[in-house]
Amino acid sequence: MQKRIVQVTATAVLLATMAMPAFASDGRDKKEDRGNGFGRIFAEFRKDLRSEHKQDKKDLKDLEKEIRKALKENRQDDDSAKVCLKAAEIAHEAALRAANAERKTSLDSARTTYQNALNAGQKARHDALISALVIFKASDMGSAAQATFIAAYVKAHTEWQTAKNAAQTAWDAAKLPVEAKWKAAKIKADADFKTAKDKCKTVTSPAPTIPDVTAPNASIISLSGATSTSLAVGWAAPGDDAATGTAASYDLRYSTAAIVTAADFNAATQVSGEPAPAVAGTSQGMTVPGLSASTIYYFAMKAQDEAANVSAMSNVPSLATLAAPDVTAPAAIANLSFSGATASSVLLTWTASGDDVSTGTAASYDIRYSTSPIVTAAEFAAATPVSGEPAPILAGLLQTTTVTGLSANTTYHFAMKVQDEAANVSGVSNASSVTTLP
């Protein structure tokens, strides 16, 4: 580009120099020109020169335009190089940020494991020493008891030291691959940056496209709406580039064990049917079905943008599903019998059946009587309820109740049902009849 500007400028100067003699004349020439053939010849020659000079002036103007255009293009090339370098710097900084973030996440996870191991070791030592001290104080505190206490004391401290050393070894081992991976990522980022800068030295417009290396922000998720088979998960959409735009997809996972490391996340069960991401900040959520009752579940999520940049792992909340609903009814009473009949009362006897079939304790009894046989559910519903039934007792135990207010010398048919706390009702008991005394 610089060479071209020099060439155009030199041509312009040469043409301007050649055009200058077109107006060169003096008074002697004018006098000699009058009235002779040479004068006419010179006059015509000067006329021709003036005409050529007009063309030269036009050529000079065209050359000036070309020079200005070349200078402008040169500035554009400089601007393109600057944009290229800026893009390389942004990519380099983003790569370093990603490497640093991954390093921090991995080290934080390893540090948590290390601290948990120390805490567990300290607690074990504390509990062992307290137990040994309690035993010692309860003893005769003689020499044998003292020796036992000292041995327990030494053992507790030895085990604590072993646990501490093991935790330190695990921490050191966990750091090595993390630091090595971070160092390799930094070396690669620096090398890519150098290569990009070298390319920028030869770049011309248009400027290169700045790559998308910014991952979505980590999500904050919450759990609610527990049933025996499902949990509701909610979150605010994280965005595409950090906290702006719209991400491309979600990866929601759950486990019955805590999700701490990237390996834990990869091993967790992946949820299907996650909603498409919305604009950053939008409230989103879904219900995860197919879970087991009375079980604690841990959930975590990552978001990905269209350039395959993946966010850091979300927080890891946990929530237990509810117990499975009680759908098991008590067993029907099979041995309802009578004794001690009088003219107005009778004693009923049966064996308690329980809450779930024949176990536990039911919630209530429904005892009914009629002067007609009670066999079907409809006949039971039409019979007269007994008031003051006793509360059920533990399954397998014998129970009794006295029914009063009966008519003398009358045959009565009795039956009963049992209900548990979940309103499950047994079938109708065996049908029995008794006749009151005259």
Image (cartoon, rainbow, N blue to C red):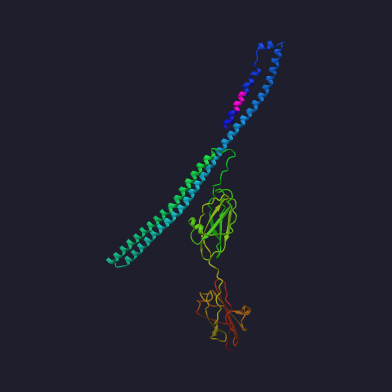
Q: Quadrant of residue 54?
A: top right
Asked if 406 appears above or below 108 in the picture, the reply is below
Q: Per the image, is 390 magenta?
A: no
Q: Closest to the observer: 286 or 382? A: 286
Q: Residue at x 33, y 62 (%)?
A: 155
Q: Closest to the observer: 118 or 283? A: 118
Q: Per the image, is 9 magenta?
A: yes
Q: Closest to the observer: 239 or 333? A: 239
Residue 409's spot in the image, x, y percent? 59, 88
Asked if 433 appears above or below 47 in the picture, the reply is below
Residue 139's spot in the image, x, y percent? 31, 67
Is residue 142 something that shows in the picture? no
* Residue extent of the magenta highlight: 8-14
Q: Closest to the observer: 21 or 220? A: 21
Is residue 364 something that shows in the picture? yes
Q: Main secondary structure of the magenta part?
A: helix
Q: How many marks?
A: 0
Q: Quadrant of the N terminus?
A: top right
Asked if 16 appears above or below 381 in the picture, the reply is above
Q: Which residue is at the far left?
A: 143
Residue 311's spot in the image, x, y percent? 53, 51
Task: Say whether residue 364 is left or right of residue 124.
Answer: right
Q: Which residue is at the far bottom?
A: 438
Q: Quadrant of the C terminus?
A: bottom right
Q: Residue at x 42, y 57 (%)?
A: 116
Q: Quadrant of residue 143?
A: bottom left
Residue 101's spot in the image, x, y percent? 49, 49
